[in-house]
Image: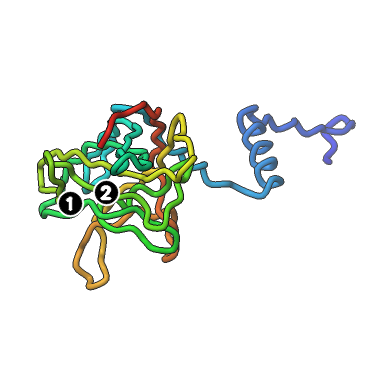
Amino acid sequence: MTSPPGGGTRRRRPVAVPIAALAMAAGLGITAALGGFDEAPEEPPEQLGPGSSLDQGEFMTTFVESRTAVQPGLFGGPGKRFLEVVLEVTNQGAETTVVGSPSQGGTPGFSFAKSLLKMVPEIKSPYGPTVSVPAGDASSSQLHPGMASTVVLRYELPQGQRPPRRVQLDVGTFEMSEGFILAPEWNLVADGDDEDAPPKVAAQVTLPVRQGGTV
């Protein structure tokens, strides 16, 4: 400190600090104390219901309904009961493809149906569901470009098992990316950047199960 003329001690004036700067500094201190800046949490999967549509990249899919179906037994014997999931699928790609199959146990799925990542409750069977495009008394497995096709997944219910009141599907989407032979191809969008990252669940679809007819 210096002494002004005439004696006494000259006091320094306090420096004014804006309140906003103080608040920012306090916020930064709290953030650092909690471990730094965290990434924003990912958005949860979209929640969909009957009649909803999802743009899956390679396909546009409408989730029509879930229903039960009965196949009468021969000569009065016991019949079979099924749970069916009905979709309307439009191939948005440039080439005809097949409906494929969802993954089953350790067997990976393929084509369109591999985007149906999981169904809850799970209906266990040795071979998984049959997936087809009904066409009158026959059926097909092809999805043609620009054409909307009805796709039916049919799960056989074990003897004595009652059908669920509703099912929930975890559904993925496709993106065009580099394939195994370097040519671009449609692949499921991964949940992360690791090579072994699982497919990302883009939507969860809840479908009530209605009582159906015979097949």
- Front-most of 159 and 119? 159
> Could you tell whether 159 is left or right of 63 in the image?
right
> Could you tell whether 98 is left or right of 127 in the image?
left
Q: Which residue type does callout 2 highlight? A: Val
- The residue at 46%/38% (across/down) is 44
The quarter holding residue 146 reads top left
> CA separation, marks 2 and 1?
8 Å
- Front-most of 20 and 148? 148
- Tell me the residue that label 2 is attached to: 131
Q: Which residue type does callout 1 highlight? A: Ser
**Is residue 81 shown above or below 195?**
above
Q: Position of residue 202 (x, y in %)?
A: 38, 42
Q: Tag 1, which secondary structure? A: loop
**Is residue 109 shown above or below 132?**
below
Label ID, residue 141: 1
Q: Position of residue 186 (x, y in %)?
A: 24, 57
- Front-most of 75 and 73? 75
Label 1 crowd (10 A; few <14 / some 14-19 / many >=20): some
Q: Position of residue 105 (x, y in %)?
A: 44, 59
Circles 2 and 1: CB distance less than 8 Å? yes
The quarter holding residue 153 reads top left
Which sits earlier in the primary sequence, circle 2 or circle 1? Answer: 2
Colour scheme of this structure image?
Answer: rainbow
**Is residue 135 shown above or below 23?**
below
